[in-house]
Amino acid sequence: MSSLLKIDDLVVEHRTPGRPVVRAVAGASLEVRAGEVVGLVGESGCGKSTLARAVVGLNRAASGSISFEGTPVTPLGLRRRTMTGVQMVFQDPYASLNPRRRVGDQIADGLRVAGDATSSPADLLERVGLPREFASRHPHEFSGGQRQRIAIARALAARPRLLIGDEPISALDASAQSQVATLMRDLAVSSGAGLLFISHDLSVVRLIADRIAVMYLGRIVEVGDTAEVWAEPRHPYTQALLGAIPKPDGMGVLPAELPGDVPDPADPPQGCRFHPRCPLVMDVCRVKEPEFGPVACWLHEPS
Amino acid sequence: MTLAITDLKVTIGGKDILRGVDLTLEPGRVHGLAGESGSGKTMTGLAVLGLLPHGSRVTGGIALEGRELLTLPPKELNKVRGGEVAMVFQDPATSLHPMLTVGRQLTEHMRHHLGLGRAEARDRAVELLRKVRIPGAEEAYRRYPHQFSGGMRQRIAIAVALACSPKVLIADEPTTALDVTVQAGVLRLLRGLCDELGLAVLLVTHDLGVMSAVADEVSVMKDGLVVETGPRSRVLREPDHPYTRTLLASLPDAEVS
């Protein structure tokens, strides 16, 4: 499979006057191939969303490179977007849809971008499982799950080759979450597009992703096939994440707690970023950062 | 038994939301309430607090230590709400007031319900923040909700709920909005508080994993009815009702267990 999106050693910094520079993404590398669903997981505040925003050009890369179909991604200009092959579904459908325009008009924007004169907004609503006549309504008439479906329809209208979901399910009601996630997967795969799905909910990512990338404090610490990572997590952080998921076995076992909080990204720890919370910490972890893949941990150093 | 719900029926706009729910909560036990969305889990929780939407008709009985709550006059009910029965909601970002300090939100109802003085309420609030393990409780008292992470906010929301030493705590999807690593901590906290303070907890969740980790008794709801009730290990391992079996079978791990 050809590489659709290639992120190489990406660094994104947030600068606020009077505050230290925050390296939200500190050297992350990731690849998404055509027709593939990649799940990006990690605790809140680890830089997942910043990474996604950099991919669509909403955040400027401080160093490193992002390329989409071989062409480098440049920050979005004020007036015109040239790179319409990448579309994004945002976290909060209450904020990402324009409350004053009919949803059909908003979906039509996407169709116009793709130069698509044959399909109508109603067709797209049908594809995301909503009745055709909803096109003439305004966003406030819908529930959270319906709004997110509309946002997905709008993103798909532009015929993206890569769809990005930035926590698209976390603002939804618990039971609508897996429905919307599976819908995104099905629509992306059936149109041959790649999907980068960002979520902190591991059980949903497991359901839909072909590959999982685990992010911790601005770096990708482990990448692998979903089934493999799930069956045999290698990085201690991945192990802790998976160990924290309670199992429905009826035994009443409380899940293991990962001690400590995510450190301040403005002042990351020396050496391996995970070492202050790692149960298997060694001497080398405190001094040197493991800069290799697919498992960035000194226990799994490639020979 | 602390709280007994018998044959609770709720109708909103001619639609039957609950069609005869029976539940009992015991002190020191966590009662889990599972089911799909729209099955009436949340409505059951809200009915106990008399927080159902306007125009809803309620019949049946909700007895708190023998006192019938459904027929209680509003003034009496206000003493129960927040005092004897407290609630924790799904999203701590919206259930806490963004413009009031944590301390204010912790002491307001304490002073109202328990008639405590300012200094007394403050001491108790700081103690509560320590109990839910907020680091730097003294300082946290003066801060605002936005200065805390999601997990910490949910701990604060739990502290707010516990402030008046309630007998019953209703937790509606308390960990759904949190990271798994944080969820583990909040679940441990809930379990610990339940054991330590002898709370009767009604845990509403769609996550059977969460249910399995903390609940003692499990009830499964479908279309406004409780289809199965029993001890956790029996309901989750040898379910009687076909609906419980489908719920368990739909989990990704189904083939393993």
Image (cartoon, rainbow, N blue to C red):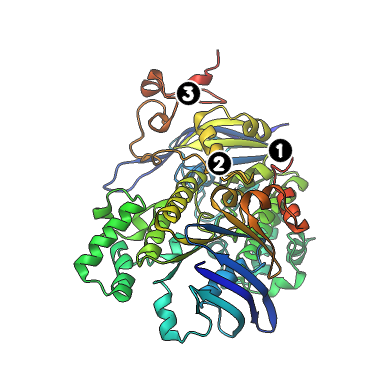
- Chain where mark 1 sits: B
- Residue at 62%, 32% (x, y): give it: A229
Residue A143 sits above or below residue B34 on the image: below
Kindly indicate whether the residue at mark 1 contacts the one at mark 2 (C-beta within 8 angstroms).
no
- Mark 3, other Cα within 10 Å: few <14 / some 14–19 / many ≥20: some
B236 left or right of B96? right
Q: Amino acid at mark 1?
A: Val
Relative image position of residue B163 (x, y in whole percent): 35, 64
| Residue linked to disc 1 | B256
- Mark 2 vs 3, N-terminal side: 2
Q: Secondary structure at mark 1?
A: loop
Q: Amino acid at mark 3?
A: Glu
Relative image position of residue B84 (x, y in whole percent): 42, 71
Q: Secondary structure at mark 3?
A: loop
- Chain where mark 3 sits: A
Q: CA distance from mark 2 to mark 1?
A: 23 Å
| Residue linked to disc 3 | A291
Relative image position of residue A271 (x, y in whole percent): 38, 25
Q: Do dots 1 and 3 share one subunit? A: no
Q: Secondary structure at mark 2?
A: strand
Question: Which disc, if any, is residue A41?
Answer: 2
Q: How many numbered callouts?
A: 3
